[in-house]
Image (cartoon, coloured by chain):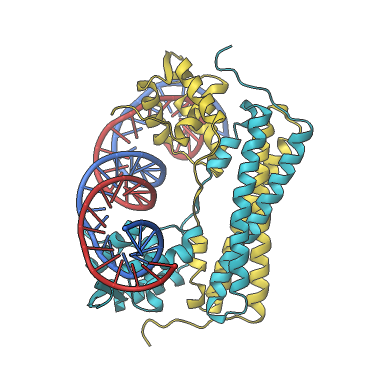
Chain colours: A cyan, B yellow, C red, D blue
Amino acid sequence: MTARAQLGTTSCVVLGLLSKRPISGYDVASLATRSIVHFWPISKSQVYAELSRLETDGYIVGTHVEQDNRPDKRRYELTTKGNEALDAWLEADGYAPDRTRSGFLAKFFFAGDMTPDQRLLLLDEYRAEIDTYRLELQAIVEKLEGRADAVYGRSTALYGLLTAEAKIKWADQMIETLSHHPPGGRRRSSS
Amino acid sequence: MTARAQLGTTSCVVLGLLSKRPISGYDVASLATRSIVHFWPISKSQVYAELSRLETDGYIVGTHVEQDNRPDKRRYELTTKGNEALDAWLEADGYAPDRTRSGFLAKFFFAGDMTPDQRLLLLDEYRAEIDTYRLELQAIVEKLEGRADAVYGRSTALYGLLTAEAKIKWADQMIETLSHHPPGGRRRSSS
DNA sequence: GCATCCATGTAATCTGTTACATGATTCC
DNA sequence: GGAATCATGTAACAGATTACATGGATGC
Protein backbone atom coordinates (compact mmCIF):
# COMPACT_ATOMS: atom_id res chain seq x y z
CA MET A 1 0.00 0.00 0.00
CA THR A 2 1.20 3.49 -0.81
CA ALA A 3 -0.85 5.74 1.45
CA ARG A 4 -1.42 5.20 5.15
CA ALA A 5 -4.82 4.01 6.26
CA GLN A 6 -4.95 6.52 9.06
CA LEU A 7 -3.00 9.68 9.56
CA GLY A 8 -0.70 9.96 12.53
CA THR A 9 -0.84 12.78 15.04
CA THR A 10 2.05 14.64 13.41
CA SER A 11 0.22 14.70 10.08
CA CYS A 12 -2.99 15.86 11.69
CA VAL A 13 -1.18 18.57 13.59
CA VAL A 14 0.31 19.86 10.34
CA LEU A 15 -3.16 19.81 8.78
CA GLY A 16 -4.46 21.66 11.82
CA LEU A 17 -1.83 24.37 11.59
CA LEU A 18 -2.48 24.72 7.89
CA SER A 19 -6.25 24.89 8.36
CA LYS A 20 -6.25 28.38 9.86
CA ARG A 21 -4.82 29.90 6.70
CA PRO A 22 -2.55 28.71 3.87
CA ILE A 23 1.11 29.12 4.77
CA SER A 24 4.52 27.93 3.64
CA GLY A 25 6.54 25.08 5.11
CA TYR A 26 8.80 27.61 6.72
CA ASP A 27 5.79 29.21 8.38
CA VAL A 28 4.43 25.86 9.54
CA ALA A 29 7.77 25.15 11.20
CA SER A 30 8.02 28.52 12.88
CA LEU A 31 4.37 28.42 13.94
CA ALA A 32 4.99 24.99 15.42
CA THR A 33 7.90 26.25 17.51
CA ARG A 34 5.73 29.06 18.79
CA SER A 35 2.82 26.87 19.76
CA ILE A 36 2.87 23.09 19.93
CA VAL A 37 6.60 22.58 20.42
CA HIS A 38 6.28 21.85 24.14
CA PHE A 39 3.99 18.90 23.77
CA TRP A 40 4.46 17.83 20.16
CA PRO A 41 7.81 18.95 18.74
CA ILE A 42 8.28 18.78 14.98
CA SER A 43 11.62 19.52 13.39
CA LYS A 44 12.04 21.67 10.33
CA SER A 45 13.03 18.83 8.05
CA GLN A 46 10.15 16.77 9.35
CA VAL A 47 7.74 19.52 8.36
CA TYR A 48 8.98 19.53 4.75
CA ALA A 49 8.89 15.74 4.61
CA GLU A 50 5.39 15.73 6.03
CA LEU A 51 4.18 18.37 3.57
CA SER A 52 5.37 16.52 0.50
CA ARG A 53 3.82 13.31 1.77
CA LEU A 54 0.52 15.02 2.53
CA GLU A 55 0.53 16.58 -0.91
CA THR A 56 1.32 13.30 -2.65
CA ASP A 57 -1.56 11.69 -0.78
CA GLY A 58 -3.92 14.50 -1.72
CA TYR A 59 -4.55 16.05 1.68
CA ILE A 60 -3.06 19.39 0.73
CA VAL A 61 -2.13 21.34 -2.39
CA GLY A 62 0.76 23.71 -2.73
CA THR A 63 0.87 26.82 -4.84
CA HIS A 64 4.05 28.47 -6.00
CA VAL A 65 4.21 32.03 -4.76
CA GLU A 66 6.67 34.44 -6.31
CA GLN A 67 8.22 37.08 -4.11
CA ASP A 68 10.46 39.98 -5.02
CA ASN A 69 12.19 40.82 -1.78
CA ARG A 70 12.16 37.29 -0.32
CA PRO A 71 12.85 33.87 -1.83
CA ASP A 72 9.91 32.32 -3.63
CA LYS A 73 7.84 29.95 -1.55
CA ARG A 74 5.23 27.28 -1.76
CA ARG A 75 1.99 27.94 0.07
CA TYR A 76 -0.10 24.97 1.13
CA GLU A 77 -3.80 24.68 1.78
CA LEU A 78 -6.11 21.82 2.70
CA THR A 79 -8.06 19.96 0.05
CA THR A 80 -11.52 18.58 0.77
CA LYS A 81 -9.85 15.30 1.63
CA GLY A 82 -7.52 17.11 4.01
CA ASN A 83 -10.38 18.90 5.69
CA GLU A 84 -12.27 15.65 6.10
CA ALA A 85 -9.22 13.94 7.57
CA LEU A 86 -8.76 16.76 10.05
CA ASP A 87 -12.42 16.61 11.04
CA ALA A 88 -12.27 12.85 11.40
CA TRP A 89 -9.33 13.18 13.75
CA LEU A 90 -11.07 15.80 15.89
CA GLU A 91 -14.36 13.90 15.95
CA ALA A 92 -12.88 10.53 16.82
CA ASP A 93 -12.52 9.94 20.49
CA GLY A 94 -9.18 8.91 21.87
CA TYR A 95 -5.75 10.26 21.09
CA ALA A 96 -2.26 8.98 20.60
CA PRO A 97 -0.82 7.67 23.87
CA ASP A 98 1.67 9.97 25.54
CA ARG A 99 5.25 9.08 24.78
CA THR A 100 7.31 10.67 27.47
CA ARG A 101 11.02 10.30 27.96
CA SER A 102 12.49 12.18 30.87
CA GLY A 103 16.27 12.13 30.82
CA PHE A 104 16.24 13.67 34.25
CA LEU A 105 14.08 11.02 35.93
CA ALA A 106 15.95 8.24 34.17
CA LYS A 107 19.08 9.48 35.86
CA PHE A 108 17.50 10.43 39.16
CA PHE A 109 16.12 6.92 39.49
CA PHE A 110 19.71 5.83 40.06
CA ALA A 111 20.56 8.74 42.37
CA GLY A 112 21.16 6.29 45.19
CA ASP A 113 24.44 5.46 43.47
CA MET A 114 25.58 9.08 43.40
CA THR A 115 27.37 11.07 46.06
CA PRO A 116 25.17 13.49 48.04
CA ASP A 117 26.85 16.38 46.20
CA GLN A 118 26.11 15.00 42.76
CA ARG A 119 22.55 14.35 43.80
CA LEU A 120 21.92 17.91 44.91
CA LEU A 121 23.68 19.30 41.88
CA LEU A 122 21.40 17.28 39.63
CA LEU A 123 18.31 18.47 41.45
CA ASP A 124 19.42 22.09 41.38
CA GLU A 125 20.11 21.88 37.69
CA TYR A 126 16.70 20.41 37.05
CA ARG A 127 14.92 22.90 39.27
CA ALA A 128 16.57 25.78 37.44
CA GLU A 129 15.62 24.34 34.06
CA ILE A 130 11.99 23.90 35.02
CA ASP A 131 11.84 27.32 36.55
CA THR A 132 13.03 28.93 33.33
CA TYR A 133 10.41 26.96 31.48
CA ARG A 134 7.80 27.96 34.06
CA LEU A 135 8.48 31.67 33.55
CA GLU A 136 8.30 31.23 29.81
CA LEU A 137 4.88 29.62 30.10
CA GLN A 138 3.68 32.16 32.61
CA ALA A 139 4.46 34.91 30.13
CA ILE A 140 2.53 33.10 27.41
CA VAL A 141 -0.48 32.49 29.62
CA GLU A 142 -0.57 36.14 30.61
CA LYS A 143 -0.08 37.35 27.07
CA LEU A 144 -2.98 35.25 25.79
CA GLU A 145 -5.31 36.27 28.61
CA GLY A 146 -8.65 37.26 27.15
CA ARG A 147 -7.62 36.56 23.56
CA ALA A 148 -10.67 34.81 22.14
CA ASP A 149 -8.70 33.40 19.21
CA ALA A 150 -6.18 31.72 21.48
CA VAL A 151 -8.32 30.09 24.16
CA TYR A 152 -6.93 26.62 23.58
CA GLY A 153 -3.39 27.74 22.98
CA ARG A 154 -3.57 29.46 26.33
CA SER A 155 -5.09 26.34 27.88
CA THR A 156 -2.24 24.12 26.76
CA ALA A 157 0.23 26.68 28.10
CA LEU A 158 -1.66 26.71 31.39
CA TYR A 159 -1.37 22.93 31.46
CA GLY A 160 2.37 23.28 31.12
CA LEU A 161 2.46 25.97 33.78
CA LEU A 162 0.55 23.92 36.36
CA THR A 163 2.65 20.82 35.77
CA ALA A 164 5.84 22.88 35.91
CA GLU A 165 4.76 24.28 39.27
CA ALA A 166 4.14 20.76 40.54
CA LYS A 167 7.60 19.69 39.38
CA ILE A 168 9.22 22.60 41.18
CA LYS A 169 7.35 21.75 44.36
CA TRP A 170 8.61 18.20 44.06
CA ALA A 171 12.19 19.38 43.47
CA ASP A 172 12.06 21.71 46.47
CA GLN A 173 10.72 18.89 48.60
CA MET A 174 13.53 16.62 47.43
CA ILE A 175 16.23 19.22 47.96
CA GLU A 176 14.88 19.92 51.43
CA THR A 177 14.83 16.24 52.40
CA LEU A 178 18.21 15.39 50.93
CA SER A 179 19.91 18.42 52.49
CA HIS A 180 19.00 17.29 55.98
CA HIS A 181 19.50 13.57 55.94
CA PRO A 182 20.94 12.36 52.65
CA PRO A 183 20.13 8.69 52.17
CA GLY A 184 21.97 6.17 50.04
CA GLY A 185 25.66 5.53 49.75
CA ARG A 186 27.98 5.41 46.84
CA ARG A 187 28.03 2.47 44.51
CA ARG A 188 31.61 1.49 43.91
CA SER A 189 32.70 0.37 40.48
CA SER A 190 36.16 -0.62 41.67
CA SER A 191 37.09 -0.59 45.33
CA MET B 1 33.26 3.59 13.66
CA THR B 2 31.89 0.50 15.34
CA ALA B 3 31.26 1.51 18.93
CA ARG B 4 29.58 4.69 20.07
CA ALA B 5 31.69 7.38 21.66
CA GLN B 6 29.19 7.92 24.43
CA LEU B 7 26.43 5.74 25.67
CA GLY B 8 22.87 6.95 25.37
CA THR B 9 20.42 7.11 28.23
CA THR B 10 18.76 3.84 27.27
CA SER B 11 22.09 2.01 27.44
CA CYS B 12 22.93 3.57 30.79
CA VAL B 13 19.52 2.68 32.18
CA VAL B 14 20.05 -0.94 31.17
CA LEU B 15 23.47 -0.88 32.83
CA GLY B 16 21.87 0.64 35.91
CA LEU B 17 19.19 -2.03 36.14
CA LEU B 18 21.84 -4.70 35.66
CA SER B 19 24.13 -3.19 38.29
CA LYS B 20 21.98 -4.21 41.25
CA ARG B 21 22.39 -7.90 40.46
CA PRO B 22 22.96 -9.99 37.33
CA ILE B 23 19.71 -10.82 35.59
CA SER B 24 18.42 -12.06 32.24
CA GLY B 25 17.10 -9.97 29.38
CA TYR B 26 13.63 -11.09 30.27
CA ASP B 27 14.14 -9.85 33.80
CA VAL B 28 15.54 -6.52 32.63
CA ALA B 29 12.44 -6.02 30.53
CA SER B 30 10.03 -6.93 33.31
CA LEU B 31 11.97 -4.87 35.85
CA ALA B 32 11.83 -1.94 33.45
CA THR B 33 8.04 -2.18 33.18
CA ARG B 34 7.80 -2.24 36.94
CA SER B 35 10.01 0.77 37.50
CA ILE B 36 11.18 3.16 34.82
CA VAL B 37 8.43 2.56 32.26
CA HIS B 38 6.59 5.79 33.09
CA PHE B 39 9.46 8.08 32.29
CA TRP B 40 11.74 5.97 30.10
CA PRO B 41 9.88 3.14 28.36
CA ILE B 42 11.97 0.40 26.78
CA SER B 43 10.36 -2.30 24.71
CA LYS B 44 11.19 -5.96 25.07
CA SER B 45 12.93 -6.24 21.73
CA GLN B 46 14.86 -3.09 22.47
CA VAL B 47 16.20 -4.66 25.64
CA TYR B 48 17.54 -7.68 23.77
CA ALA B 49 19.05 -5.49 21.08
CA GLU B 50 20.64 -3.28 23.71
CA LEU B 51 22.07 -6.24 25.61
CA SER B 52 23.79 -7.75 22.61
CA ARG B 53 25.22 -4.38 21.67
CA LEU B 54 26.46 -3.74 25.20
CA GLU B 55 28.04 -7.18 25.26
CA THR B 56 29.71 -6.72 21.88
CA ASP B 57 31.13 -3.43 23.10
CA GLY B 58 32.39 -5.01 26.32
CA TYR B 59 30.17 -3.26 28.86
CA ILE B 60 28.54 -6.47 30.03
CA VAL B 61 29.15 -10.23 29.88
CA GLY B 62 26.49 -12.86 29.66
CA THR B 63 26.65 -16.32 31.17
CA HIS B 64 24.55 -19.20 29.97
CA VAL B 65 22.41 -20.52 32.81
CA GLU B 66 20.80 -23.93 32.48
CA GLN B 67 17.43 -24.45 34.07
CA ASP B 68 15.39 -27.63 34.41
CA ASN B 69 11.87 -26.39 34.86
CA ARG B 70 12.24 -23.19 32.83
CA PRO B 71 13.90 -22.39 29.53
CA ASP B 72 17.64 -21.78 29.74
CA LYS B 73 18.61 -18.17 30.01
CA ARG B 74 21.52 -15.81 29.70
CA ARG B 75 22.41 -13.81 32.76
CA TYR B 76 24.26 -10.54 32.28
CA GLU B 77 26.57 -8.66 34.60
CA LEU B 78 28.61 -5.47 34.29
CA THR B 79 32.27 -5.62 33.35
CA THR B 80 34.74 -3.10 34.75
CA LYS B 81 34.19 -1.06 31.61
CA GLY B 82 30.46 -1.23 32.18
CA ASN B 83 30.79 -0.11 35.78
CA GLU B 84 32.98 2.77 34.74
CA ALA B 85 30.54 3.83 32.04
CA LEU B 86 27.68 3.79 34.52
CA ASP B 87 29.69 5.84 37.01
CA ALA B 88 30.69 8.30 34.31
CA TRP B 89 27.04 8.81 33.44
CA LEU B 90 26.03 9.36 37.05
CA GLU B 91 28.95 11.68 37.75
CA ALA B 92 28.55 13.84 34.66
CA ASP B 93 26.20 16.71 35.13
CA GLY B 94 23.37 17.21 32.72
CA TYR B 95 20.95 14.68 31.33
CA ALA B 96 19.24 13.89 28.08
CA PRO B 97 16.64 16.55 27.23
CA ASP B 98 13.06 15.54 27.85
CA ARG B 99 11.30 14.31 24.78
CA THR B 100 7.63 14.60 25.50
CA ARG B 101 4.83 13.90 23.09
CA SER B 102 1.35 14.34 24.40
CA GLY B 103 -1.27 13.04 22.02
CA PHE B 104 -3.91 14.59 24.20
CA LEU B 105 -2.52 18.13 24.14
CA ALA B 106 -1.80 17.90 20.42
CA LYS B 107 -5.49 17.29 19.91
CA PHE B 108 -6.75 19.63 22.59
CA PHE B 109 -4.79 22.46 21.01
CA PHE B 110 -7.32 22.29 18.16
CA ALA B 111 -10.32 21.92 20.46
CA GLY B 112 -11.65 25.22 19.15
CA ASP B 113 -12.63 23.34 16.01
CA MET B 114 -14.63 20.73 17.90
CA THR B 115 -18.21 20.84 19.03
CA PRO B 116 -18.73 21.55 22.76
CA ASP B 117 -19.73 17.92 23.25
CA GLN B 118 -16.61 16.54 21.67
CA ARG B 119 -14.51 18.89 23.73
CA LEU B 120 -15.99 17.77 27.02
CA LEU B 121 -15.81 14.13 25.99
CA LEU B 122 -12.13 14.51 25.25
CA LEU B 123 -11.48 16.17 28.60
CA ASP B 124 -13.47 13.56 30.50
CA GLU B 125 -11.59 10.80 28.78
CA TYR B 126 -8.28 12.39 29.64
CA ARG B 127 -9.25 13.09 33.21
CA ALA B 128 -10.27 9.48 33.71
CA GLU B 129 -7.00 8.24 32.23
CA ILE B 130 -4.87 10.44 34.45
CA ASP B 131 -6.92 9.53 37.49
CA THR B 132 -6.30 5.83 36.92
CA TYR B 133 -2.64 6.58 36.56
CA ARG B 134 -2.73 8.73 39.68
CA LEU B 135 -4.16 5.92 41.78
CA GLU B 136 -1.56 3.55 40.43
CA LEU B 137 1.22 5.88 41.47
CA GLN B 138 -0.35 6.57 44.83
CA ALA B 139 -0.30 2.86 45.56
CA ILE B 140 3.37 2.64 44.60
CA VAL B 141 4.33 5.63 46.71
CA GLU B 142 2.52 4.19 49.71
CA LYS B 143 3.96 0.73 49.19
CA LEU B 144 7.52 2.05 49.07
CA GLU B 145 7.06 4.28 52.12
CA GLY B 146 9.98 3.76 54.45
CA ARG B 147 11.72 1.25 52.21
CA ALA B 148 15.37 2.31 52.37
CA ASP B 149 16.26 0.37 49.22
CA ALA B 150 13.64 2.16 47.15
CA VAL B 151 14.04 5.81 48.14
CA TYR B 152 14.61 7.01 44.60
CA GLY B 153 12.11 4.68 43.03
CA ARG B 154 9.57 6.14 45.41
CA SER B 155 10.76 9.66 44.58
CA THR B 156 10.19 9.21 40.86
CA ALA B 157 6.75 7.79 41.60
CA LEU B 158 6.04 10.80 43.80
CA TYR B 159 7.08 13.02 40.92
CA GLY B 160 4.52 11.29 38.75
CA LEU B 161 1.90 11.56 41.46
CA LEU B 162 2.35 15.30 41.96
CA THR B 163 2.29 16.03 38.24
CA ALA B 164 -0.76 13.80 37.81
CA GLU B 165 -2.55 15.76 40.51
CA ALA B 166 -1.70 19.00 38.74
CA LYS B 167 -3.05 17.64 35.48
CA ILE B 168 -6.30 16.61 37.14
CA LYS B 169 -6.68 20.06 38.65
CA TRP B 170 -6.16 21.54 35.21
CA ALA B 171 -8.72 19.20 33.67
CA ASP B 172 -11.29 20.00 36.34
CA GLN B 173 -10.70 23.68 35.81
CA MET B 174 -11.19 23.25 32.06
CA ILE B 175 -14.31 21.14 32.43
CA GLU B 176 -15.75 23.69 34.83
CA THR B 177 -15.06 26.62 32.51
CA LEU B 178 -16.25 24.90 29.35
CA SER B 179 -19.45 23.63 30.97
CA HIS B 180 -20.56 27.13 31.80
CA HIS B 181 -19.61 29.16 28.77
CA PRO B 182 -18.19 27.02 26.00
CA PRO B 183 -16.06 29.15 23.70
CA GLY B 184 -15.21 28.53 20.09
CA GLY B 185 -17.46 27.38 17.29
CA ARG B 186 -17.21 24.57 14.85
CA ARG B 187 -14.80 24.64 11.95
CA ARG B 188 -16.63 23.51 8.85
CA SER B 189 -14.88 21.36 6.31
CA SER B 190 -17.83 21.35 3.96
CA SER B 191 -20.97 23.32 4.60
C1' DG C 1 -7.64 -27.58 27.25
C1' DC C 2 -6.25 -22.74 27.65
C1' DA C 3 -3.95 -18.84 29.43
C1' DT C 4 0.03 -17.13 31.39
C1' DC C 5 4.76 -17.08 32.49
C1' DC C 6 9.42 -17.79 31.17
C1' DA C 7 12.74 -16.96 27.53
C1' DT C 8 14.89 -15.08 23.24
C1' DG C 9 15.13 -13.03 19.33
C1' DT C 10 14.39 -11.27 13.98
C1' DA C 11 12.44 -8.31 10.43
C1' DA C 12 10.18 -4.61 8.79
C1' DT C 13 8.95 -0.28 9.43
C1' DC C 14 8.36 4.14 11.23
C1' DT C 15 9.67 8.26 13.39
C1' DG C 16 12.57 11.66 14.20
C1' DT C 17 17.14 14.08 14.71
C1' DT C 18 21.35 16.21 13.01
C1' DA C 19 24.27 17.78 9.84
C1' DC C 20 24.87 19.38 5.39
C1' DA C 21 23.83 22.45 1.47
C1' DT C 22 22.36 26.83 -0.75
C1' DG C 23 21.28 31.56 -1.29
C1' DA C 24 18.92 36.17 -1.26
C1' DT C 25 17.56 40.02 1.70
C1' DT C 26 17.26 42.94 5.57
C1' DC C 27 18.65 45.01 9.79
C1' DC C 28 22.30 46.77 12.86
C1' DG D 1 30.73 43.59 7.24
C1' DG D 2 28.03 40.28 9.87
C1' DA D 3 24.05 38.29 11.91
C1' DA D 4 19.40 37.11 11.45
C1' DT D 5 15.42 36.07 8.70
C1' DC D 6 13.19 33.84 4.88
C1' DA D 7 13.09 29.65 2.22
C1' DT D 8 13.65 24.63 0.93
C1' DG D 9 15.31 20.57 1.03
C1' DT D 10 18.67 15.99 1.17
C1' DA D 11 21.27 12.37 3.38
C1' DA D 12 22.68 9.72 6.99
C1' DC D 13 21.70 7.85 10.94
C1' DA D 14 19.73 6.87 15.50
C1' DG D 15 16.16 5.32 18.08
C1' DA D 16 12.09 2.77 18.85
C1' DT D 17 7.68 0.17 17.77
C1' DT D 18 5.11 -3.69 16.01
C1' DA D 19 4.42 -7.91 14.37
C1' DC D 20 6.18 -12.31 13.73
C1' DA D 21 8.24 -16.63 15.35
C1' DT D 22 9.05 -20.45 18.68
C1' DG D 23 8.42 -23.45 22.54
C1' DG D 24 8.42 -25.70 27.24
C1' DA D 25 6.36 -25.44 31.99
C1' DT D 26 2.91 -24.21 35.21
C1' DG D 27 -1.51 -23.14 37.09
C1' DC D 28 -6.59 -23.03 36.66
Report the side of A57 relative to B57 (left or right): left
Residue at the farthest right position: A180
Decide which of A23, B169 is in the foreground and name it. A23
Residue at the farthest bottom position: B191
Total of numbered circles in the picture?
Answer: 0
Quadrant (top left/top right/bottom left/bottom right) for the N terminus of chain A: bottom left
Residue A145 image position (x, y, % from top left) = 62, 75
Q: Is residue A188 above or below residue B98?
A: above
Residue B97 image position (x, y, % from top left) = 50, 45
In which quarter of the view is residue A177 placed? Answer: top right
Q: Is residue A48 above or below residue A107?
A: below
Q: Tell me the residue at 50%/69% (across/down).
A: B109
In which quarter of the view is residue D16 placed? Answer: top left
Residue B2 image position (x, y, % from top left) = 29, 27
Decide which of D4, B106 is in the foreground and name it. D4
Report the side of B46 relative to B141 (left or right): left
Q: Is residue B17 above or below residue B143?
A: above
